[in-house]
């Protein structure tokens, strides 16, 4: 793919306004993900089926701005996760590895509050909160999923190498090891295995704000 340059780049791509109120990049088209697109993502399957019966609600939208797949180019998108839960689990994105595993990404919070569930195949995992005006660095070879832990839409910009590509299948197979749930005093993070097999020793971590 030829390099986008100062001469070829459309002005609206050279300088783009983020509409934090509507959660859009004006001029770009959003892809919507509804509950029915997220089968297998939520821990509580009965709650998922019940939620689906109640209506196939919009969970999140992604608007891709520029996709510069030339060597050294960057792409970026605006994500908006709606407030809501399936059972106690907050609305989330599917999540993915980058097909080019080494490709890292920078997330910048635009409005609302949420965070990123991160993990790699070397056994590390973490929930990293992300609020408006904050930035989270997603290292290479790290699967990432966004969750909305607030009660208003959570929007953020993700910036990644244009050649990154998206690999959804590798993480979908076993799902993320961490789940983010509504607790009595705000979000709590648990291991999926503890949630599915509850015992008094299950590790519950408070998601620090
Ligand atoms: C983001 C994501 C966005 C939607 O722009 O694409 O949050 O999540 P899914 O792609 O997992 O549905 C990003 O990480 N791009 O690489
Ligand atoms: Zn990504």
Image: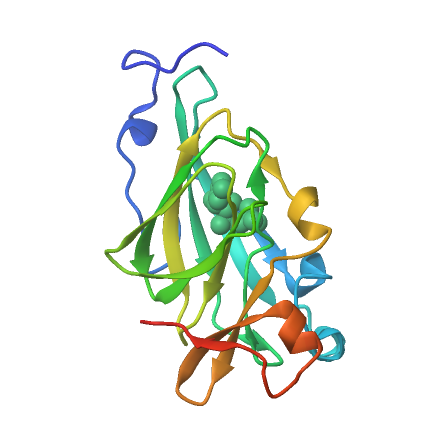
- Quarter where residue 152 is shown: bottom left
User: In this rendering, would 209 be left or right of 35?
Assistant: left
Residue 59's spot in the image, x, y percent? 56, 63
The one of 59 and 140 positioned closer to us in this rendering: 140
User: In this rendering, would 159 be left or right of 69?
Assistant: left
User: Which residue does the image show at 45% across and 16% down from the upper left?
Assistant: 70
The one of 175 and 159 positioned closer to us in this rendering: 175
Compared with residue 172, is residue 75 higher up or lower down, i.e. above or below? above
Q: How is the image coloured?
A: rainbow
Residue 97's spot in the image, x, y percent? 57, 41
Number of disc labels:
0
Residue 26 in sight in this render: no
User: Which residue does the image show at 48% across and 66% down from the upper left?
Assistant: 82
User: Which residue does the image show at 70% across and 44% down from the upper left?
Assistant: 169
Residue 98's spot in the image, x, y percent? 55, 36
Compared with residue 76, is residue 48 higher up or lower down, i.e. above or below? below
The one of 189 and 165 positioned closer to us in this rendering: 189
- Quarter where residue 139 is shown: top left
Q: Residue furthest left?
A: 133
Residue 53 in sight in this render: yes
User: Which residue does the image show at 65% across and 44% down from the upper left?
Assistant: 168
């Amino acid at each position: 793919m030829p390099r986008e340059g100062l001469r070829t780049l459309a002005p609206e791509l050279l300088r783009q306004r983020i509409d934090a109120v509507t959660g859009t990049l004006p001029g770009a088209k959003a892809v919507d993900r509804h509950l029915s697109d997220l089968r297998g993502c939520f821990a509580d399957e009965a709650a998922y089926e019940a939620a689906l019966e109640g209506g196939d609600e919009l969970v999140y939208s992604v608007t891709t701005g520029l996709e510069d797949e030339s060597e050294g180019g960057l792409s970026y998108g605006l994500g908006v996760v709606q407030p809501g839960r399936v059972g106690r689990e907050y609305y989330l994105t599917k999540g993915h590895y980058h097909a080019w595993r080494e490709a890292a990404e920078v997330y910048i919070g635009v409005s609302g509050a949420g965070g990123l569930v991160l993990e790699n195949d070397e056994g590390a995992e973490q929930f990293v909160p992300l609020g408006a005006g904050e930035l989270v660095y997603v290292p290479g070879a790290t699967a990432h999923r966004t969750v909305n832990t607030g009660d208003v839409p959570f929007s953020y910009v993700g910036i990644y190498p244009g050649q990154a590509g998206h690999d959804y299948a590798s993480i979908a197979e076993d799902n993320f090891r961490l789940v983010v749930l509504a607790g009595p005093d705000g979000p709590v993070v648990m291991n999926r295995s503890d949630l599915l097999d509850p015992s008094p020793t299950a590790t519950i971590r408070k998601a620090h704000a």
